[in-house]
Image: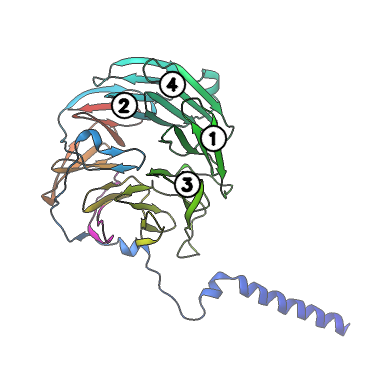
């Protein structure tokens, strides 16, 4: 009997010790605390180290480099509201001074600059899109329209007449953007598997599978091309540099949360932006990074993140996070300007003399020569993005396209 009691107490003591070891709060309360610089403190206060900007503007036709995800400031200003088109948009792009749109009824359509429909084609029959919420990614290059979707299909149409050039089903949903290099199309599916496909005929060149988790999010899968290198992320929180000349992984980075108690369960990343042989990206594990293109070494990192597109000039990086508009020093990552607004910023555009912030059903225009000076313009839709064609800016919402010229 005594032996049984002793065994019971031994088990009880052992269990209590094990319980203490896995108790995170008990564990971190012991010993010396290492202070982690958290994002909320880093971005807590408004910063105005600069009040005017000197930005070298790009001409409107090269403001965006698709393969590098690089958005430049544009040498345009917002004119008067010209025309509008009501359409339930799910994907959009532009090519040869035309708008290419996919709507929720699975129509692929091409419009001219005056928002007149030129041609249209049905992608799926109603019985398919009615019972499935289909998300698309679109790329228009080399007189071809490439569409990938969450049904695991890749569609390629002629830009001239919307003839189907080829279609391929690879079963698993595609969630990344698409990129083209030489004769090959690159994209990633929801299993973190990257594909190389001949864009002319649709033949599979190769595929490369990386680690993947059960919970999926389209922001986990980012892709970018620069010179002969393919950069991509997966849902396991990793960044790879693949040499396309020999198929070797040159380097990889595994992103880890700085504060393991608050590490996000789903990895989400901004687009991988490449400028002057430096990679810029941000992820919800907590940092904004500048990374050396050749070695993968981190040039600088700052303890905050933004998953939205950002704009890069010769001196600055412009970005938004929730209701904050931020300007960073491109070389150091230091915050030069940070201003909080009352409402969430949906998107922004760096113009000739102004900065346009899209906020719900209006936009703010900040004076680049005096950042404390701005005015608002009321609009009738919640605009979330834009397309630039020639001298015209097209604001896009979920159900409308509005032309300003």
> Residue 78: which disc?
none
Image coordinates for residue 198, horizontal then vertical, percent:
49, 30
Residue that carries the numbered disc 4 in the rendered image: 157
In the displayed orientation, state which residue is furthest to the bottom: 2
Verify whether residue 331 appears in magenta: yes
How many marks the image carries: the answer is 4
CB under 8 Å between discs 3 and 4:
no
Q: Earlier in the sequence, mark 3 or mark 1?
A: 1
How crowded pointer 3 is (Cα within 10 Å; few <14, some 14-19, many 20+) is rated as many
Residue that carries the numbered disc 3 in the rendered image: 220
> Residue 205: which disc?
1
Q: For the C terminus, give its image quadrant.
A: top left
Region of the chain picked out in magenta, as a range:
326-346
Residue that carries the numbered disc 2 in the rendered image: 95
36 displayed left or right of 78: right
CB under 8 Å between discs 3 and 1:
no
Q: Residue at x 46, y 24 (%)?
A: 156
Image coordinates for residue 134, horizontal then vertical, percent:
49, 29
């Amino acid at each position: 009997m005594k032996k049984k009691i002793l065994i019971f107490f031994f088990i009880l003591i052992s269990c209590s010790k094990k319980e203490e070891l896995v108790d995170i709060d008990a564990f971190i309360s012991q010993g010396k605390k290492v202070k982690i610089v958290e994002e909320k403190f880093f971005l807590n206060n408004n910063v105005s180290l600069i009040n005017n900007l000197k930005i070298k503007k790009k001409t409107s036709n090269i403001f965006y480099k698709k393969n590098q995800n690089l958005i430049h400031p544009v040498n345009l200003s917002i004119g008067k509201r010209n025309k509008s088109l009501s359409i339930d948009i799910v994907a959009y792009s532009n090519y040869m001074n035309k708008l290419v749109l996919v709507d929720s009824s699975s129509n692929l359509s091409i419009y001219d600059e005056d928002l007149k429909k030129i041609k249209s084609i049905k992608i799926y029959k109603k019985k398919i899109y009615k019972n499935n919420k289909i998300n698309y990614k679109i790329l228009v290059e080399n007189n071809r329209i490439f569409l990938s979707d969450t049904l695991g299909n890749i569609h390629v149409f002629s830009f001239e007449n919307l003839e189907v050039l080829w279609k391929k089903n690879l079963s698993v949903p595609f969630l990344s953007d698409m990129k083209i290099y030489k004769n090959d199309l690159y994209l990633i599916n929801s299993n973190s598997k990257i594909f190389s496909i001949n864009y002319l005929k649709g033949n599979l060149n190769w595929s490369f599978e990386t680690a993947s988790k059960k919970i999926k999010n389209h922001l986990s899968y980012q892709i970018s091309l620069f010179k002969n290198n393919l950069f991509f992320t997966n849902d396991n929180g990793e960044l790879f540099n693949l040499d396309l000349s020999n198929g070797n992984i040159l380097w990889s980075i595994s992103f880890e949360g700085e504060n393991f108690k608050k590490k996000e369960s789903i990895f989400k990343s901004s687009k991988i932006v490449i400028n002057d042989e430096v990679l810029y990206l941000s992820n919800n594990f907590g940092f904004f990074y500048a990374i050396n293109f050749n070695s993968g070494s981190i040039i600088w990192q700052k303890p905050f993140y933004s998953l939205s597109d950002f704009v890069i000039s010769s001196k600055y990086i412009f970005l938004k996070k929730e209701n904050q508009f931020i300007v960073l020093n491109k070389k150091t990552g230091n915050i030069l300007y940070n201003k909080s607004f009352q409402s969430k910023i949906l998107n922004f555009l760096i113009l000739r003399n102004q900065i346009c912030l899209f906020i719900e059903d209006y936009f703010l225009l900040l004076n680049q020569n005096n950042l404390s000076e701005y005015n608002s313009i009321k609009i009738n839709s919640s605009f979330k993005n834009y397309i630039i064609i020639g001298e015209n800016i097209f604001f896009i919402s979920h159900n409308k396209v509005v032309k300003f010229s």
